[in-house]
Image (cartoon, rainbow, N blue to C red):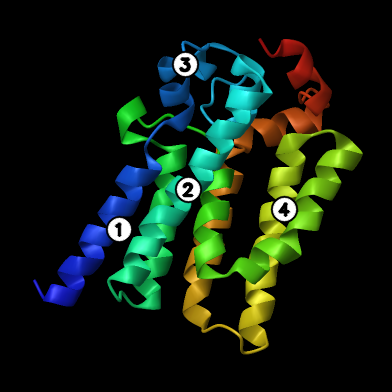
Amino acid sequence: MEPALLQGVVLVVTGYLIGSLPMGVMVARLTNGRDPRSIGSGRTGGTNALRAMGPGRGLAVGVLDIAKGAAPVLLAVAVGADQLVQALTGVAAVLGSCRSIFLRLHGGRGVAAAIGAMLIIQPIAVVLSAPVFFGVIWLSRYVSLGSLLGSAAAGLAMALLVMLGFDPPVVLVYGIGAVALIWLSHADNIGRLLRGQERRLDSLNREAV
């Protein structure tokens, strides 16, 4: 195997393994908090960690999830990997967040990890999509809807930046891949939204312990 190809494979696998780190479970165990898998959606990300452990530890999980998305892409940049490998490493980190090898392919929704990777790959897309993410949550009180529409906006922002010549088309490997994984991981949320049964943000505060 050629050195560049071997390096790419190692980086992508590393991205998946780092993305697989179940920060919600780890924070719960280290702080004697409630395991987020035991409540609500059973997911391990920041939203369900907020529901299980309250705002402080929920925020910590969110920040750590962002970091685990950014770290492997930063590593790829640091060793001089090309942009395709950087993009694939970011996608792998999001996949690990959604389907963790440490949790028998269970995990979170991948949103925070996707934000972390995108902050390295194209931070402008994060800035452009942030008003959609926060605005939808504020207006609808649905975190899932904000995540879905915010991720779609980020993907569209990346496409626009490619069209304007700011980025090469290869970055869309990350944009399309990450958005697809986020939407797939929200399949149950989409069903509840369509049925009018999705949990609102206000319910998280009532359920937090």
Do callouts 4 and 1 mark residues in contact (Cβ within 8 Å)? no
- SS at circle 3: loop
Q: Position of residue 114 (x, y in %)?
A: 54, 52
Given residues 57 and 158, the one toward you in this image is 57
> N-terminal of the two: label 4 or label 3?
3
Write down the residue under mark 4.
Answer: 150
Q: Amino acid at mark 2?
A: Ala
Q: Amino acid at mark 4?
A: Gly
How much space separates mark 3 and mark 2, taking CA atoms? Answer: 19 Å
Q: Is residue 203 above or below residue 134?
A: above
- The residue under the point 46% across, 24% down is 27
Q: In the displayed structure, does residue 47 sit left or right of residue 128?
A: left
**Nearest-to-viewer mark from 1 and 3:** 3
Write down the residue under mark 3.
Answer: 31
Write down the residue under mark 2.
Answer: 67
How much space separates mark 1 and mark 3, taking CA atoms? Answer: 31 Å
Mark 3, Cα crowd under 10 Å, few <14 / some 14-19 / many 20+, is: few
Write down the residue under mark 1.
Answer: 12
Residue found farthest to the bottom: 165
- SS at circle 2: helix
- SS at circle 1: helix
How much space separates mark 4 and mark 3, taking CA atoms? Answer: 31 Å
Do callouts 3 and 2 mark residues in contact (Cβ within 8 Å)? no
> N-terminal of the two: label 1 or label 3?
1
